Image (tube, helix red, strand yellow):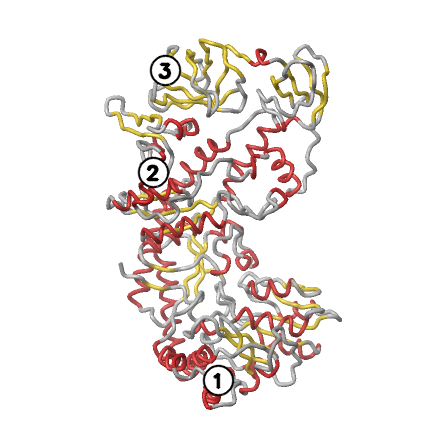
């Protein structure tokens, strides 16, 4: 099979459309593939207005096909719904019920976009894939590694969600938008005559309408014929004082302030959720500060796994301003301890911890 | 890139003869066939002529032919027209048009088929009950090409006093059809499956069969289907039917030879490949082949990128994640169903194209198996 064909993951949005357009204009042999990940006709109670306006909706497939036709490239929809449900949706639900706050986008990158999609691309004869992610990739001949850097457009940077990618995956991946900012991408979209150039950016997690995680989980259980587990219980302070009740642990995430419905004079925040006892621990803002955290499932990207403690800036959620820290390896290469120079607020189990040196993405893992 | 079309069960091109017959109708015979004046009479004449030709192909009389918008409408008209408030007996391998329409009736029993994709007429008999108003069993299956024992089922239905419909969309044009010999009361055909345009089909309605119209608003088609007649479409269907009669068995034999060449070539070249529905009587142009350890999705795409158009089931279910209901009905696992491809031949195919297709399939299957570590 020829290596030169590039499969572009086309979502129907502007970014991936521009990727297809710019590669095509450059003379590459390009095919467009849209991943059908989730059937938006499922769980209709979550979207009373019908399955519109979200990822994998018929409109998105229509848009992607329209762009592919405009460019004159081969285009196909590939169905990954089963894999997406098994490896993204179900773990997402399990994580919430286990009191953690998952990032489905990272799971999707690890197990769908840079795994099954790569495999599909290779199967149909495309040796490389290209996506509309905002991140930069460079080959470093000295270290013999693919290095990942934050995108030129810091506001659009998506490296936080890409920490799980292995060298082998990166060697077959292109992020053509990494050096551009969003206005330039939109400008290029117009220049290329992309019919969807003015389409708004997508924001929320694609399969959860309106960001209502708890509602999604309840609806999913009902669809599966499972009575949603009653996870309601007590709101307690760190010293065990009961200060109220809550409707279910999966409605809460560390650092959350809204929805506690307790009046005790000073603002209260969720410090931890304890699924085993169905308790939600609340406290003051300063109770959220943590000097260190354990990180598992660690993957190193731009550097080989360090054997000595290493300095890095660490992001503990997507919108976090990376904090100075020391990363301490352990005997188990997949586990590290991160010691912050300054205690960090709302270190949330289930979120990613991504290690940077300036723009360079060193690696990352999952917060325990 | 040279492109070859091996998906004639999905649809066929309009043949030059059919196109030549239709073109002047669209521009010159534009009258409304219900109008009294000259223009209307010309249209009526063309429509009647087309009806006679379709009737001739099916061994029916002209007044037994109701033109419809296609196979789906013909199937819906048969089921709703006979059994709206009754029970239907049908099979697990019907086309979605029959599956979907029968699901909306008061009741339906779906009789399973054997591992070759053929229904046992005795099973049909056992499924009959006092409220059964229609038996509907397809003549040939769209995915496997398997031919059902329609004559025997017709006898059983007649003995029971139940109307018998057969969806002949995948049989008409591929095998000889004579509705009198088959013993059917209702028989659906679709123009675009045999070189007439999309948007026209017909339902054979045996004289004396009481059918309730579904579309209302005029006296067209002997009160059975209101709506201004699609004269050009009907003329195309009539010309295609005439062509089938003229061609006789020669083209069928040619396609059967090519189909056998394709199957033999693939079975020889590709290890662990199997013909689904093997051993059953089949339409001469259809082959459904399973490749162990392969997902048909990348296989189909890779073939298309090389210029070969094939199908992973019926076109109506593509894009759907559920495996083919036909393939699971013959006992294949979900994985086996997902590793199957349908090749359906037609007039444009040649031995050279078939050999090129065999080559491409062998190459891509080998490539995909190399990528699938699970396949040993």
Quadrant where the image shows the N terminus of chain B: bottom left
Q: In which quarter of the image is residue A97?
A: top right
Could you tell me residue A15's position as x and y percent?
38, 40
B34 above or below B197? below
Disc 1 sits on a residue from what chain? Answer: B
Query: Which circle, 2 or 1, is nearer the viewer?
Result: 2
In the rendered structure, the answer to whether residue A315 lies left or right of residue A285 reads: left
| Secondary-structure class at tag 1 | helix
Distance, label 2 to label 1, CA atoms, is: 57 Å
Residue that label 2 marks: A185
Q: Can residue A110 be seen from the camera position used here?
A: yes
Q: Earlier in the sequence, mark 3 or mark 2?
A: 2
Q: Image check: A108 left or right of B184?
A: left
Asked if labels 1 and 2 touch by Cβ distance under 8 angstroms, the answer is: no
Task: Name the residue tied to disc 1.
Answer: B47
Q: Nearer the viewer, residue B32 or B160?
A: B32
Considering only vertical position in the picture, is B45 above or below A151?
below
Closer to the camera in the image, A104 or B329: A104
User: Within 10 Å of the Cα at label 3, are there few (<14), some (14-19), or many (20+) other Cα atoms?
Assistant: few
């Amino acid at each position: 099979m020829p290596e030169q064909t590039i499969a572009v993951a086309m979502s129907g949005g502007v970014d991936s459309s521009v990727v297809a357009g710019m590669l095509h204009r450059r003379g590459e042999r390009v095919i467009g593939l849209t991943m059908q990940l989730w059937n938006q006709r499922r769980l209709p109670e979550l979207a009373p207005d019908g399955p519109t306006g979200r990822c994998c909706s018929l409109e998105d497939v229509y848009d992607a096909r329209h762009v592919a036709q405009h460019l004159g490239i081969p285009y196909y929809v590939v169905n990954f719904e089963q894999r997406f449900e098994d490896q993204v949706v179900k773990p997402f639900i399990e994580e919430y019920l286990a009191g953690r706050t998952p990032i489905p986008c990272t799971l999707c990158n690890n197990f769908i976009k840079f795994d099954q999609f790569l495999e599909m691309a290779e199967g149909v004869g495309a040796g490389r894939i290209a996506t509309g992610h905002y991140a930069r990739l460079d080959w470093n001949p000295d270290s013999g590694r693919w290095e990942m850097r934050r995108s030129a457009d810091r506001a659009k940077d998506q490296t936080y969600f890409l920490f799980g990618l292995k060298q082998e995956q990166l060697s077959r991946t292109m992020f053509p938008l990494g050096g551009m900012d969003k206005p330039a991408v939109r400008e290029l979209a117009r220049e290329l005559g992309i019919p969807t150039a003015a389409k708004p950016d997508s924001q929320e997690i694609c399969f959860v309408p309106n960001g209502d995680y708890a509602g999604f989980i309840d609806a999913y259980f009902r669809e599966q014929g499972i009575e949603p587990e009653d996870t309601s219980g007590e709101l307690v302070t760190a010293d065990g004082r009961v200060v109220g009740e809550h409707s279910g642990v999966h409605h809460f995430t560390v650092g959350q302030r809204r929805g506690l419905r307790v009046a005790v004079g000073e603002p209260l925040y969720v410090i931890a959720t304890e699924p085993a006892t169905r308790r939600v621990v609340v406290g003051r803002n300063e109770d959220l500060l943590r000097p260190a955290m354990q990180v598992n499932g660690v993957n190193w990207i731009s550097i080989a796994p360090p054997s000595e403690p290493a300095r890095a800036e660490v992001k503990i959620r997507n919108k976090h301003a990376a904090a100075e820290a020391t990363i301490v390896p352990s005997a188990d290469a997949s586990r590290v301890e991160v010691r912050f120079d300054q205690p960090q607020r709302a270190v949330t189990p289930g979120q990613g911890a991504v290690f940077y040196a300036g723009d360079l993405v060193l690696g990352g893992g999952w917060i325990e | 890139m040279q492109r070859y079309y091996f998906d004639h069960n999905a649809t066929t091109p309009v043949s030059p003869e059919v196109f030549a017959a239709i073109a002047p109708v669209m521009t010159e015979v534009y009258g409304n066939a219900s109008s009294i004046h000259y223009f209307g009479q010309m249209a009526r004449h063309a429509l009647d002529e087309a009806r006679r030709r379709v009737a001739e192909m099916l061994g029916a009389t002209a007044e037994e032919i109701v033109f419809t918008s296609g196979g789906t409408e013909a199937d819906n008209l048969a089921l709703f027209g006979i059994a709206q408030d009754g029970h239907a007996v049908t099979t697990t391998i019907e086309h979605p048009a029959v599956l979907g329409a029968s699901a909306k009736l008061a009741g339906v029993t779906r009789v399973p088929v054997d591992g070759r994709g053929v229904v046992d007429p005795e099973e049909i008999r056992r499924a009959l009950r006092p409220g059964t108003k229609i038996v509907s069993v397809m003549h040939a299956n769209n995915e496997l090409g398997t031919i059902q024992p329609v004559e025997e089922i017709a006898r059983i239905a007649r003995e029971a006093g139940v109307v018998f419909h057969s969806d002949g969309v995948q049989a008409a044009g591929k095998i000889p059809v004579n509705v009198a010999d088959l013993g059917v009361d209702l028989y659906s055909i679709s123009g675009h499956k045999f070189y007439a345009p999309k948007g026209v089909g017909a339902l054979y309605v045996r004289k004396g069969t009481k059918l309730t119209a579904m579309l209302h608003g005029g006296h067209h088609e002997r009160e059975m289907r209101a709506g201004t007649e699609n004269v050009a479409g009907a003329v195309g269907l009539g010309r295609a039917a005439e062509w089938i009669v003229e061609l006789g068995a020669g083209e069928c034999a040619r396609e059967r030879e090519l189909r056998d060449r394709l199957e033999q070539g693939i079975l020889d070249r590709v290890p662990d490949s199997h013909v689904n529905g093997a051993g059953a009587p089949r339409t001469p142009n259809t082959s459904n082949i399973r490749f162990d350890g392969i997902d048909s999705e990348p296989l189909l795409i890779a073939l298309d990128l090389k210029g070969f158009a094939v199908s992973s089931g019926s076109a109506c279910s593509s894009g759907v994640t559920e495996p083919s209901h036909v393939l699971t009905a013959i006992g294949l696992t979900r994985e086996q169903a997902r590793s199957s491809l349908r090749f359906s031949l037609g007039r444009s195919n040649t031995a050279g194209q078939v050999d090129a297709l065999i080559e491409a399939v062998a190459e891509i299957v080998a490539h995909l198996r190399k990528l699938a570590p699970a396949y040993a």
